[in-house]
Amino acid sequence: MTMTVHHRERQAARGQSRTDRIEYRLLVALAFVICFVMVAASRALSAFRGHPVKTHGQSIFAEARASAHATAGYAFIA
């Protein structure tokens, strides 16, 4: 009897873990789109105004991805 109870608990924990990973990936995907637009707009406006573009050594995709992961992490704090 205790074997089946432990097995069910492990399965429930795995299911919750899988759900958390899916939620995190969806949050990152949503945040990536928003961050990508913001980074691209920021760089385009800087170039349009004639200011040097601050890339920090990263491509637009890398900067948006890093920002998205940083942003999505805060959603799980609450």
Image: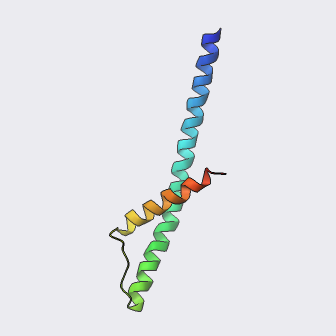
User: Quick one: which residue is furthest to the left in this view?
Assistant: 57
Q: Residue at x 46, y 68 (%)?
A: 36
Classify the position of the N terminus by image quarter.
top right
Q: Residue at x 57, y 42 (%)?
A: 20
State left or right for residue 35 relative to residue 74. Answer: left
* Quarter of the figure with residue 52: bottom left
On the image, the x and y values in percent for residue 30 come to: 54, 59
Q: Which x, y percent locates residue 3?
A: 60, 11
Residue 6 to residue 62: above or below: above
Indicate the position of residue 40 as horizontal and vertical percent values. Answer: 43, 75
* 61 lies above or below 41: above
Image mark count:
0
Residue furthest to the bottom: 50
Occupied quadrant, residue 7: top right
Q: Determine whether, in the image, residue 66 is placed left or right of residue 73.
A: left
Q: Is residue 61 left or right of residue 20?
A: left
Q: Image height check: is 35 above or below 10?
A: below
22 up-or-down from 5: above or below: below
Front residue (pair 54, 42)? 54
How are the colours assigned in the image?
rainbow
- Residue shown at 55%/56% (left/top)? 72
Residue situated furthest top in the rendering: 1
Is 25 in front, or is 75? 75
Toward the viewer: 10 or 37?
A: 10
Query: Residue 34, percent across and down?
Result: 52, 67
